[in-house]
């Protein structure tokens, strides 16, 4: 059932090979291990032992257990689809709050989700999954990080994480800026308020065209994108002075225009 490369990953992992481990290869190991050895609850101690012996930086019990459970949920899928559906390494944020995941208890013991029960994520078109993974892994080239790319990544994140995706977008953009050596200045670099505003606009557009119900339909992706192409759109909700301020760049500021206050009521999760 599994490709030979997956079985090789499994064998190398439990032989304590220290070469080439990443999110994708660990998914392969988990898939083969669950099919071969045990259920997540009994397999978790084995993963803990190996990852600790491999000096895995920041071993996290809840995240490890969460991924084993997600792989088990995807066990009925073909290997290629399993790898695609679980390719986004931030999927646990759909089920756990950042506060819970960052707690000492979550790092040392397996905690249950506090947002919603685990479930398989939506299917995305392969092109959108590839773009999202490049964003998250920080391999996305700087010239490719365009306004449209930002919108498409935000759509993918919203479809997979719902409202919780705002945090993932914020962290992801800042990590990508670090790789691209984009400094934070009064006139450039990461912008917290704009990141939240665009995520809210994307969420509204996704729901308006029904993309949240038909996430594989590329024509709906294009339809949702169409009204968001204007980079000046946030100025319908903010005065330029407020939006371009240092305070708006480093933190969240509420809209100061009447239309902005009305819009915010429909996407209050970004506040």
Image (cartoon, rainbow, N blue to C red):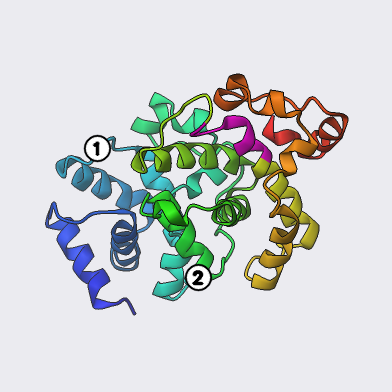
The image quarter in which residue 3 lies = bottom left
Mark 2: secondary structure:
helix
- Distance from label 2 to label 1 (Cα)? 30 Å
Q: Nearer the viewer, mark 2 or mark 1?
A: 2
Q: Any magenta on residue 196?
A: yes
In the rendered image, is residue 258 in sight?
Answer: yes
In the rendered image, is residue 74 in sight?
Answer: no
Q: Is residue 136 left or right of residue 236?
A: left
Q: Which percent across, then down, holds residue 208?
A: 80, 57
Please name whichever residue, 228 or 59, is drawn nearer the observer in this view of the structure: 228
Q: Name the residue beneath numbered marker 2.
A: 126
Q: In the image, what residue occupies the spot 23% across and 72% down?
A: 5
Which of the labelled discs sits on residue 57, or is there none?
1
Q: Quadrant of the C terminus?
A: top right
Q: Which percent across, then down, holds residue 262?
A: 86, 34
Please name whichever residue, 230 or 116, is drawn nearer the observer in this view of the structure: 230
Which SS does the magenta portion mostly show? helix
Q: Which residues are magenta?
A: 188-197
């Amino acid at each position: 059932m599994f490709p030979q490369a997956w079985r090789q990953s499994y064998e190398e992992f439990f032989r304590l090979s220290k070469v080439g481990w990443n999110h994708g290869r660990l998914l392969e190991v988990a898939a083969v291990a669950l099919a071969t050895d045990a259920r997540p609850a009994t397999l978790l101690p084995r993963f803990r032992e190996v990852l600790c012996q491999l000096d895995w930086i920041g071993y996290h019990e809840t995240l490890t257990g969460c991924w084993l459970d997600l792989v088990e949920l995807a066990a009925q899928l073909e290997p290629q689809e399993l790898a695609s559906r679980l390719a986004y390494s931030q999927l646990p944020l759909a089920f756990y709050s950042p506060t819970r995941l960052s707690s000492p208890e979550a790092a040392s013991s397996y905690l249950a989700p506090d947002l919603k029960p685990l479930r398989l994520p939506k299917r995305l078109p392969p092109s959108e999954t590839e773009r999202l993974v490049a964003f998250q892994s920080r391999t996305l080239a700087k010239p490719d990080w365009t306004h449209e790319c930002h919108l498409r990544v935000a759509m993918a994140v919203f479809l997979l994480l719902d409202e919780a995706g705002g945090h993932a977008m914020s962290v992801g953009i800042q990590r990508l800026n670090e790789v691209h050596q984009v400094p934070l200045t009064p006139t450039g670099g990461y912008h917290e308020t704009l990141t939240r505003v665009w995520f809210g606009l994307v969420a509204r557009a996704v729901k308006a065209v029904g993309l949240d119900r038909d996430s594989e339909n590329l024509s709906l992706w294009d339809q949702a994108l169409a009204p968001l192409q204007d980079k000046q759109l946030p100025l319908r909700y903010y005065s330029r002075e407020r939006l371009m301020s240092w305070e708006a760049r480093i933190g969240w500021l509420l809209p100061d225009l009447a239309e902005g206050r009305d819009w915010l009521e429909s996407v209050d999760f970004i506040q």
